[in-house]
Image (cartoon, rainbow, N blue to C red):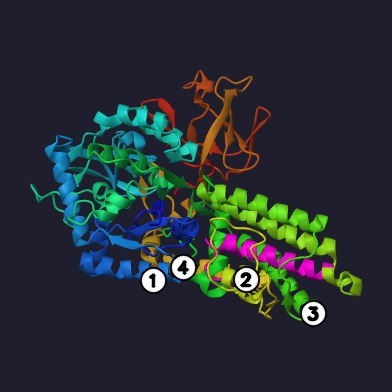
Amino acid sequence: MAAAKPTYYITTPIYYPSGKLHIGNSYTTVACDAAARFKRLRGYDVFFLTGTDEHGLKIEQKAEKLGQTPQAYVDGMAKGIKELWQQLKITNDKFIRTTDDYHEKAVQKIFQQLLDQGDIYKGKYSGWYSVDDEEYFTESQLAEVYRDDQGNVIGGKAPSGHEVQLVEEESYFFKMSKYADWLMDYYQAHPDFIQPQSRMNEMLNNFLKPGLEDLAVTRTSFSWGVKVPSDPKHVVYVWIDALSNYITALGYGSDDDANFKKYWPADVHMVGKEIVRFHTIYWPIMLHALGLPLPKHVIGHGWLTMREGKMSKSKGNVVYPETLVNRYGLDATRYYLLKAMPFGNDGVFSPEDFVDKVNYDLANDLGNLLNRTVAMVNKYQAGHLVGQPTATTAFDADLEATAARVFTNYVQLMDETRFADALSEIWKLIARANKYIDETEPWVLAKDDSQAAVLSDVMTHLAKALRFAAAMLQPFMPDVPAEIWRQLGLASDPVSLVDLKFDDFPAEAQVVAKGTPIFPRRDRKEEIEFIKSQMSANQKQKGRKAMAEKQQDQAPVAETTGKKAIRFDVFEKVELKVAEIKAAEPVEGSDKLLKFQLDDGSATGRQILSGIAKWYPEPAALVGKKVVIVANLKPKKMLGHESNGMILSAEHDGQVTLVTVPESLVNGSGVE
């Protein structure tokens, strides 16, 4: 009896279907698909889950605006997301929807168990709520606060930039505070639970150490959600509902829980950094309270941003994956997404970078290597390869050693989900094979009949290198590896990555097919203009949607609160950014000015002078604080020092306080 395969369970977050998914959203699913494909090729029994999070006030409001029922709205959105995953050739084993009947029943059981054992209690909630984020915030957590003339808080913005509103309602609360010490101990005992390490530090320093508050877990102000069985006026709040999908999809809470017993705990929850807190604080505590083991790893990847800041449908600066796939092909699009995102950090999308990666990495390096090899085998060998070389030169040995070294590193990096680094390793072999052509000079060998055997060996080594590289590319590219093997005259069946060997090559003669370029080179200027035109079309569409509001903003205005109001198009020119204070000191010869050195996300940083010395007699204590700056003011000289911008502060009752933002915000982020 064959031994059972090791299991591997990986999940994406379940996507909120409030709008069309862009390439930043798609990255997570493509990354999980690459991991799932890799593990299958390594002999694992894989379960890969994705889906949609379909409840909540935002969905209810969106459907009402469109004149639809919430169910009809989410049905259409889920259909579109499934179609996108099919176009991207995502190999998920299941697609869960939180409106699925089995999920809703399991959520009710989970809630009732937590209520019965005293982990949930009824109370009253009063606080700031963001509909877009489906999240509550305390006043101190808000990135921006609006005050009236008396200094009372009347509104503000969440760290995401979305507007918040004051909510007061009866709610059930989860006793998160009860488990805070346990969770900190768990972090210490499992240092690789959250990856990268910076996310672990953020959770500890920003949320656990300051004190974990109990969490409101129901709402009564809307009805689109899972009802609390014992108190049906309450709807189970999104995070208990949504997070439970990772176990309900496996059958937890149902009569058929075989998959739960087989695959749980998850090996990897992969999520964007903006929802790490929910997956590494709320979710572990929920599981612990239920008596269940925790997932092995939660990976919080960065954002795929634009040069001007975060990719956002509200800004209209998005790029949709369908646009890239339809023009450049699936494999080029997937390659770019996985190469552009460094592990743990943000990636930056630009039309120029996309086109350059297609032209240089794919067309020049990989595509040209295949084209040259096929052409030379056809020209010099009449389209035949001899599978086993008769001799090995120093160049041959180095090529083989490079392949072995690359594969070892590749496996480790793929196990660590470091996809960009794994691709870089593959390209080391591709670069070595291109160099091998220049070293061996087949065109010279072809002129000397006595070198026929050497020439044959060179052609076979090139074919082996291409086969080897294509095998490692299988998790990233669904189509190109098989096409490479076809052009080399090899079988196009998937190649196992359990024990890949350079010399695993058919011994008999192989006929090399003449093939078309797998990645045709593109006109750089033309393609950059195409992508920009698509982005511009998205911006125009967003602009038309907001035209009525903008026209109102630009209408003649009256005097308000003693200051002249400005038109929206004037205010729109102000560039606000997040910056971190790296140094702060008094300006010599002034009792008012402080000089700040700030990291604003640029290579050089910036210096700003501010007249707040009176309120900050120990400026060094400000180092490490994250503030909001006006980044596009003209430079100004003060006492011989240049000031490049302004740091925002608030004044109340004669006291001036710097406006600070959460440490989790990335330096240089735009403030909307």
Residue 571 appears at what percent x and percent y? 47, 51
Query: In terms of sequence position, does the residue under pointer 4 or pointer 2 come before the other?
Result: 4
User: Spatial distance from mark 4 to mark 3, Cα to Cα?
Assistant: 37 Å
- Disc 1 residue type? Glu
SS at mark 2 in the image: helix
Residue type indicated by callout 4 = Leu
Amino acid at dot 3? Lys
Q: Looking at the image, is mark 4 or mark 2 nearer the viewer? A: 4
Residue annotated with mark 2: 527
Look at mark 3 in the image and give the residue it sits on.
Answer: 379
Picture coordinates of residue 5, whole percent (x, y): 41, 54
Ranked by sequence position, the earlier of labels 3 and 2 is: 3
Name the chief secondary structure element in magenta: helix
Q: In this view, does 490 lie to the left or right of 447?
A: left
> Residue at left 62%, top 67%?
528
List x then y, in percent, for residue 484.
Answer: 63, 71
Q: Is residue 131 visible?
A: no
Q: List the residue tagged with mark 1.
A: 83
Above or below: residue 621 compared with residue 344 = above
Query: In the displayed structure, does residue 57 sit left or right of residue 323?
Result: left
Work out whether residue 663 or residue 464 is closer to the camera in this orientation and state it.
464
Task: Read off the magenta span.
Answer: 454-479
Q: How many marks?
A: 4
Vertical position of residue 361 compared to residue 167: above or below: below
Query: Which element carries disc 4, helix, strand or loop?
Result: loop
Question: Looking at the image, which residue is at 55% across and 65% down?
Answer: 495
- Label 3 and label 2: CA atoms lie apart by 33 Å
Q: Residue 88 carries which label?
A: 4
Q: In front: mark 4 or mark 3?
A: 3
